Amino acid sequence: MIAAPQTQTHALRFEILYQSKRSRARVGRIHTPHGIIDTPNFVAVGTNGSLKTLHNHQLDDLQLMFCNTYHLMVQPGTEVIKNAGGLHQFISRQQPIITDSGGFQVFSLAYGDVAKELKGQGGKKHSGSVLKITEEGVTFRSYRDGTKIFLSPETSVAAQKDLGADIIIPLDELLPFHVDEAKLKASFDRTHRWGLRSLQTHLQRPQKQAMYAVIHGGTDLKLRQQSCEILREHAFDGFAIGGSLGCDHAQLFQTVAATTQYIPDDKPVHLLGIGDLISIPQCIPHGIDTFDSCYPTKVARHGMVFTQQGALKMTRKIHEREFFPLEEHCLCATCRHYTRAYLHHLFKANEPSAASLASVHNVHFMVQWMASIRMEILCGLI
Amino acid sequence: MIAAPQTQTHALRFEILYQSKRSRARVGRIHTPHGIIDTPNFVAVGTNGSLKTLHNHQLDDLQLMFCNTYHLMVQPGTEVIKNAGGLHQFISRQQPIITDSGGFQVFSLAYGDVAKELKGQGGKKHSGSVLKITEEGVTFRSYRDGTKIFLSPETSVAAQKDLGADIIIPLDELLPFHVDEAKLKASFDRTHRWGLRSLQTHLQRPQKQAMYAVIHGGTDLKLRQQSCEILREHAFDGFAIGGSLGCDHAQLFQTVAATTQYIPDDKPVHLLGIGDLISIPQCIPHGIDTFDSCYPTKVARHGMVFTQQGALKMTRKIHEREFFPLEEHCLCATCRHYTRAYLHHLFKANEPSAASLASVHNVHFMVQWMASIRMEILCGLI
């Protein structure tokens, strides 16, 4: 076990209840000022402070919610949220929240779809919204009103202080997948300098927030190791695996496996932007504690719901007369009240409530599935 | 008081608790197999068996919901709903439901937007979806798959028997606003023949459903009187005022006033498709008991919310920092949890939850407003 520096803010306490003997998987609890996150767990994405189609009191069993600083900077502005008493107060959520740095979205505008880019699927579109990237930070134009916004490690932390999430993340530079080694290394070094500037800014005024380091290095396993070795020397409260994780599941799992072994065992580990049904069970044995993804709500809006027997496409004719719930013993509000046949009908009739009912179920499914995974770890199965 | 024939099915019982001494307004209770409707009351429209953006368990204080037979015939088909155990079961609503005959939508397809036509605002578009109108009924093409559907008084009642709503409505013929007197009179006579055929079909198998007559006559007050005189001789459980109600509020109020005096006092009176903030208080003194309208949910989706101080457009900048509820003492789920500032933000960020939160509030507002109107009647103010 690699010991971590004892200087962090203790806004967050990670309690490991059980360490698997078969793998790096563990069952734990992240204690935050807004309550406990049982780990491993799923983190739903509510970009603008709301899960798509849902309101925040429909989600009592969701322990951690991910909000996007970039979006909240542009609308309504973090200063408005600060005035409201912080993000929890503004969006009326009592449970823990994590915010990102804003970097992902800014660079997404520069390189097209970063999510695709990170998987090597993107083109090389430059929308022109990023005006300048320097050592200081990045200047971009708001997609809403064209105003210039300067995002630096310091301004990102300041924005996240305004928001007041339980867990915050330092600004990192994201590169397209297809870059040469020299560019990757230069970006790698800058991202770590930005990470430490972020931490320094954060520690001046911790405000009971915790900061996770972002581990970079793309699919270069040596760089990933080096990233961990740099970051673990500093007082981060946890670690997030960011940057490009390759173009397929195999590369993702390889990168995750190669990275987590260099992360101190006693710190929570988050995998940024990954939370699909295939990746989660593959990554947990490598010691990933939390996963964020908009996948469950996104596919719900297109009529896909998760069940233990696999995903169902609710628009299919086969569901027309299924007068029973999506899942027989599911306790979500959708399954307690409505049938597959009704959901099928709502999707066919283009009723907006269809997406919302499917989203309620999918988020509940993820949360329950993670609970069953914790049980499997405790039973020695993972 | 005009006595009604004593042959109705008693599936519905209308209890008048208080008759105003100042006007025809009254406070009552409609007893149905699925519970009580306090009157006067607002009836929200859930065309496809769901209020737009809401699910049916978000609406516990809504006593009566209006569903559209035409839409449910086309999708999922009334036979599917019958198989589910009826509409209440299918959409998971325990409280009363009213369905229309399907006529409004069929003729809407023939004459463009009937809602506009009835107000004299429409053009004379013929989409060709109505293939034939005869004494027997109307043949039209489904907008979904082009299949021919025959709607007659008998098939409409049969469809509404499949659905099993507490209150059903006979098929009527709707004409554009701009027709000559001869056409109006021919349609008037046919609609009454259709009404009696509907009643006859219904009474063969009442199934604990109640049937309201539809009063026609357009803005011709003599015809309205004649319509009441014909219909009140038959065993209808209540009366719905249908057809064209004129092109402005003045004509609407005049028509309503001229009509209700010929309706038996001891029967509930519904005003079809009217439920806006101006019409309701004007129509209640004339003895209207229930109003249906999609207005509160429709405007909610466009950012308008109702308050005692008038309607608010939530996208306006003025709401950006209003860190208090839409209405200070409102007990709806939206006001209990969220602020105007948050709703403003969700609308500005195009979050689908914005429409749903505004709809929850507006429907609750209507229901509460009707409760306060009942109180005003009881206090002798209306």
Image (cartoon, coloured by chain):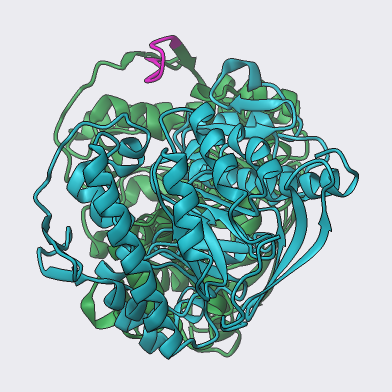
Chain colours: A green, B cyan
The answer to whether residue A146 is left or right of residue B269 is: left
The answer to whether residue A292 is left or right of residue A93 is: left
Q: Residue at x 49, y 41 (%)?
A: A47
Camera-side residue of B207 and B240 = B240
Q: Is residue A116 visible?
A: no
Residue B102 figure quarter: bottom left
Residue A64 figure quarter: bottom right
Q: Is residue A227 visible?
A: yes
Camera-side residue of B266 and B292 = B266
Camera-side residue of B134 and A283 = B134
Work out whether A140 lies above or below B171: above
| Residue A326, position as x, y percentages in the image | 43, 79
Work out whether A153 lies above or below B152: above
Residue B166 lies in the magenta stretch: no
Magenta residues span: A140-148
| Residue A315, position as x, y percentages in the image | 26, 69
Residue A204 figure quarter: top right
Magenta part mainly helix, strand or loop? Answer: loop
* Badge count: 0
- In the rendered image, which quarter contains the N terminus of chain A? bottom right
Camera-side residue of A268 and B115 = B115
